[in-house]
Image (spheres, helix red, strand yellow):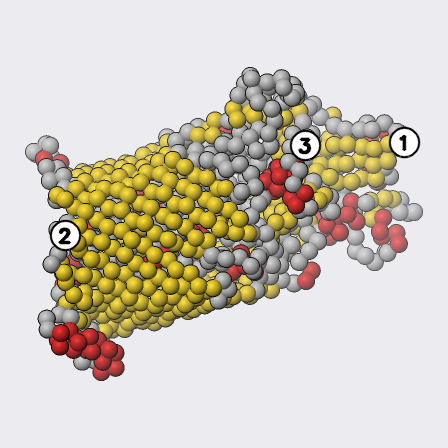
């Protein structure tokens, strides 16, 4: 092309935005539907092979092709060879392999995801408003460091931490899911430190599809069902297209744990035989064990008076019966091995699964206003509610005076003659459990345009959009104890008339206090419950405005081939506001909500290019400048390359600088609290802790250096076989994190007074300790590992000449070699293989599908490798080193891995020659294998990588008219 022609083509693009006179370019080889036909299922296929190998949509654009969506690059060219590994789930995978009616549960089975937040493991998110959210976590770096996109654009966050709830996406229209495993901030902006997950919709779908399914566990609980409908049609000679979808899903809650594995009873205790220098381990694991300082009807843990602890061990049963606790063969101040260990109910009366309801609506209207321009508008609305059993009213320090009326009635005046007070521990069986109710609705409205045209004699693509989203949350905790009222109600005495009343009522008869009888089960009055409990709540709104413009073109060519360039810019503004009634901001046993108010904006511009250097050798690079209103300017970049010396082998490598800016919650959080347990390094016992965290407006962006090196082998002698191996290394500095209670206590034990100042007794008396913490840019996180992916697709007739059908085998595994979070204040520990704080050493998933035109069956094997309960422990039986708070010794530290086997059966049939129907059955955890068991009180199992429900069944139908 002449220089004049190039200038004219350049001019045509800008004039086109107002005049519509650009020459159309309609090469269908570049259309997204064509790209889909060339795609494969294999992870880490080249960007040109990312899209799904599915049947193209029956809707065809007559004048204007779709702008190609290639995840991992802004270059809209299916022949551009991105060096970034990409893994893809196709429509077939989603239909045949999803264990539930929630797409996130399938995505989270991919080995690249570790530590994702799910409804199963967010039971104790009492105050953070994230209970029930399905938030993806790549590389265990935290869900806030994994960016989620919808059709290559940011989508509406569901929380003030910026997390995108996968539940809010129109799952029935998802054509494929692309997972970029490598830093992508230069292409997509902040948060893409660990990678990107892009949900690509079938925007030209024509037809109608209706799905319905229902499921249940092998124990008869966990009943769930869902229904969805989606349709699309063209109009105005296919220049316009309409998409509509809606779905509803319900799941019954499981609010107590009756599984036998939860009766395992192993606990970590201080070794009574340990002495400095005697070679014994400091801690040991023993069972069966249970909590001994808080029982359903109360237990006296200590008493004061002439004879100290004269009442210790008296516990109260049904109707206030008086009993004496058997502390078993071994006990601490919190735990007993043997004896009456089974009396504790704090491991049974907790939730295994939340009850939930989800509703989604989605609509999209597009129209080809010119051969080079398609305008579109999208709207989405989601409602969800998740209800959890957050556990019983756990208290270990209820103070009863010697003249407490209920105590006198239970034990008699003679037993209390020389007793000044007694301290009681209870799980308050008569009181309702603490229930968390997290409701949210998410609205998103997007307006944009896109198109293809000719520039410099080559195809070019442009897109622009503006998006508004608003998330409203209502976070409420029911049945929470008011500390002041509990204190008054506990102090029960007899009035001059002989009635039991609150002592405060004697001087203030109208205060409404109703006394509480803690001594036994079936003894607390409804009036006392109504008086002492409340339902704190918080309402919050999170608003996001995003706009962006992108241009992909081929401005010139070298002797080796075309040079591709993409440029663009984005603007983002995020604001949060909240409301909490003043009476719910303090004074409660948990919650104590405070509103979060604040916001920031971001301005960004980027450039990406792909330059061929020689035959089979190409360079890819990107740079992005970002200006944060809170922390200033940062630059991110990425360089990489591909080398394909022969058709069968491709080598690829990338090096990138990525960033994550602090989110609104980290900057402006008003304060949230949670209840947790810690091992007390002074006593070796377990303490309960009320932990409060607040935001830090002085936070700055995190910075990461990421390296990925790998290869893809597709041998010609074995058509359909693909093998890829990639090594990754991510080093994150200035990581935004905070010390939690255990770390703070350990640091204080080591003598650091700055940590000791954050610890104090719990003034309410309901917990042992109160700990306050805030986030800081204090940490470094380093992780590395290897991803392995192999897939093979072949017609069975190649092996057995007369057997029809196709066999597809796919195996994926990630080996985490290293995961180190280094605060600089304590020794760095490699937590790879640590089930409580790091990723497992190995995460794997294998699938095999045999398909015929009328039937398919899929088998899946997945799991994690065995590991340690905590890598900070030093396992030994004899010759152990002296106690060290960072590396305490323990006699047993190993935990088993998991292996789960799933099956899917699908029968396909035509319906009167104009529709297709599928009947399917999924069986998840076919062998009913146990979860990973851990030596803890409460839920004695890992809830992130394990199947807590056991064997489950899900069956349903899919019906489609075209």
The vertical placement of 123 against 190, above or below, is above
Residues tagged 2 and 3 counted as in contact (Cβ below 8 A): no
Q: In the rendered view, does 411 fall on the left or right side of 160?
A: right
At x 41%, y 50%, the residue is 704
Q: Position of residue 427 (x, y in %)?
A: 66, 39
Q: In the rendered view, does 662 fall on the left or right side of 207?
A: right
**Circle number at residue 417:** 1
At x 51%, y 46%, the residue is 779
Q: Nearer the viewer, residue 21 or 585?
A: 21
The first of marks 3 and 1 along the sequence is: 1
Q: Splitting the image into 4 quarters, where does residue 667 fall?
A: bottom right
Q: Splitting the image into 4 quarters, where does residue 635 fall?
A: bottom left
Which residue bears the numbered disc 3? 682
Which residue bears the numbered disc 2? 614
Rounded to the nearest angstrom, the CA distance separating label 2 from label 3 is 66 Å
The first of marks 2 and 1 along the sequence is: 1
The vertical placement of 43 against 304, above or below, is below
Q: Nearer the viewer, mark 2 or mark 3?
A: 2
Is the N terminus in the top left, top right, bottom left or bottom right quadrant? bottom left
Q: In the rendered view, does 469 fall on the left or right side of 325?
A: left
Of helix, strand and loop, which one carries label 3? loop
Q: Nearer the viewer, residue 756 or 404?
A: 756
Q: Position of residue 79 (x, y in %)?
A: 17, 56
Q: Nearer the viewer, residue 132 or 619?
A: 619
Q: Residues within 10 Å of mark 1 (few under 14, many from 20)?
A: few
């Amino acid at each position: 092309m002449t220089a004049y022609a190039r200038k004219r083509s350049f001019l045509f693009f800008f004039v086109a935005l107002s005049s519509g006179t650009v020459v159309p370019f309609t090469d269908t080889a570049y259309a997204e539907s064509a790209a889909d036909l060339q795609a494969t299922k294999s992870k880490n296929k080249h960007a040109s092979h990312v899209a799904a190998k599915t049947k193209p949509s029956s809707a065809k654009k007559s004048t204007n092709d779709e702008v190609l969506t290639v995840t991992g690059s802004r270059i809209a060219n299916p022949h551009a060879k991105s060096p970034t590994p990409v893994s893809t789930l196709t429509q077939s995978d989603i239909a045949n392999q999803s264990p539930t009616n929630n797409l996130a549960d399938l995505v989270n089975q991919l080995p690249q995801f570790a530590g994702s937040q799910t409804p199963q493991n967010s039971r104790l998110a009492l105050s953070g408003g994230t209970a029930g959210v399905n938030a993806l976590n790549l590389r265990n770096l935290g869900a806030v460091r994994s960016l989620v996109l919808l059709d290559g654009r940011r989508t509406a966050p569901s929380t003030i931490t910026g997390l995108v709830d996968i539940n809010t996406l129109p799952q029935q229209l998802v054509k494929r899911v692309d997972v970029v495993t490598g830093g992508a901030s230069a292409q997509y902006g902040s948060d893409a430190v660990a990678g990107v997950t892009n949900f690509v919709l079938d925007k030209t779908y024509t037809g109608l599809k209706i799905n319905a399914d229902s499921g249940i566990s092998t124990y008869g609980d966990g009943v769930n069902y869902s229904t969805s409908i989606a349709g699309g049609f063209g109009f105005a000679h296919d220049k316009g297209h309409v998409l509509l979808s809606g779905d509803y899903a319900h799941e019954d809650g499981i609010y107590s744990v009756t599984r036998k594995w939860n009766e395992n009873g192993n606990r970590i205790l201080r070794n009574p035989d340990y002495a400095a220098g005697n070679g014994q381990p400091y801690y040991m694991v023993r069972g069966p064990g249970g909590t001994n300082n808080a029982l359903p009807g109360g237990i006296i843990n200590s008493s004061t008076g002439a004879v100290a602890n004269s009442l210790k061990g008296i516990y109260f049963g049904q109707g206030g019966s008086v009993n004496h606790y058997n502390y078993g063969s071994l006990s601490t101040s919190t735990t007993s091995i043997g004896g009456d260990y089974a009396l504790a109910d704090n491991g049974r009366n907790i939730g295994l699964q939340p009850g939930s309801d989800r509703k989604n609506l989605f609509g999209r209207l597009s129209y080809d206003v010119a051969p080079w321009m398609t305008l579109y508008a999208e709207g989405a609305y989601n409602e969800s509610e998740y209800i959890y059993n957050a556990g019983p009213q756990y208290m270990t320090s209820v103070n009863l005076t010697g003249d407490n009326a209920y105590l006198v009635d239970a034990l008699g005046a003679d037993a209390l003659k020389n007793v000044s007070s007694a301290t009681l521990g209870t799980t308050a069986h008569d009181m309702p459990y603490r229930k968390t109710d997290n409701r949210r609705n998410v609205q998103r409205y997007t307006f944009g345009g896109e198109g293809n045209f000719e520039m410099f004699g080559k195809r070019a693509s442009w897109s622009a959009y503006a998006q508004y989203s608003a998330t409203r949350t209502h976070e409420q905790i029911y049945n929470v104890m008011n500390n002041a009222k509990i204190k008054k109600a506990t102090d029960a005495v007899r009035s001059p008339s002989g009635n039991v009343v609150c002592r405060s009522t004697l001087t203030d008869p109208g205060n409404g206090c109703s006394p509480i009888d803690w001594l036994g089960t079936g003894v607390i009055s409804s009036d006392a419950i109504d008086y002492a409990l409340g339902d704190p709540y918080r309402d919050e709104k999170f608003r996001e405005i995003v706009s962006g413009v992108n241009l992909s073109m081929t401005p010139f060519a070298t002797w080796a081939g075309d040079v591709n360039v993409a440029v663009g810019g984005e603007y983002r503004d995020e604001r949060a506001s909240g409301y909490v009634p003043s009476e719910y901001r303090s004074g409660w046993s948990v919650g104590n909500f405070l509103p979060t108010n604040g916001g920031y904006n971001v301005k960004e511009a980027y450039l990406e290019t792909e330059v061929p250097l020689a035959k089979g050798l190409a360079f890819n690079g990107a740079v992005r400048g970002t200006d944060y209103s809170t922390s200033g300017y940062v630059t991110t970049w990425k360089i990489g390359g591909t080398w394909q010396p022969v058709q069968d082998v491709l080598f690829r490598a990338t090096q990138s600088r990525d960033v994550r800016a602090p989110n609104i919650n980290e900057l402006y959080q008003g304060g949230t609290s949670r209840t947790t347990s810690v091992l007390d390094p002074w006593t070796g016992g377990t303490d309960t802790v009320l932990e409060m965290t607040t935001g830090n407006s002085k936070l700055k962006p995190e910075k990461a250096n990421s390296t990925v090196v790998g290869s893809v082998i597709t041998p010609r002698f074995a058509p359909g076989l693909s093998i890829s191996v990639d090594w990754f290394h991510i080093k994150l500095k200035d990581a935004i994190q905070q010390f939690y209670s255990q770390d703070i206590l350990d640091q204080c034990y080591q003598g650091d007074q700055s940590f000791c100042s954050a610890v104090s007794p719990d003034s309410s008396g309901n917990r042992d300790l109160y700990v306050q913490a805030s986030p800081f840019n204090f940490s470094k996180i380093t992780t590395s590992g290897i991803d392995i992916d192999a897939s093979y697709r072949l017609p069975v007739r190649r092996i057995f000449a007369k057997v029809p059908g196709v066999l597809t085998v796919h195996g994926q595994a990630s080996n985490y070699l290293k995961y180190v979070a280094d605060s600089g204040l304590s020794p760095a520990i490699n937590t790879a293989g640590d089930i409580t704080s790091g990723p497992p050493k190995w995460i794997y998933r294998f699938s095999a599908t045999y398909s015929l035109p009328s039937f398919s069956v899929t088998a899946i094997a997945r799991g994690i490798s065995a590991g340690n309960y905590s890598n900070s422990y030093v396992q030994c039986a004899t010759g152990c080193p002296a106690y060290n708070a960072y590396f305490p010794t323990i006699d047993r530290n190993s935990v088993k891995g998991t292996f789960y086997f799933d099956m899917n059966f699908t029968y396909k049939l035509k319906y009167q020659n104009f529709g297709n129907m599928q009947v399917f059955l999924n069986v998840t955890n076919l062998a009913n294998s146990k979860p990973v068991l851990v030596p803890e009180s409460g839920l004695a199992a890992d809830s992130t990588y394990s199947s807590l429900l056991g064997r489950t069944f899900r069956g349903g139908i899919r019906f489609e008219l075209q």
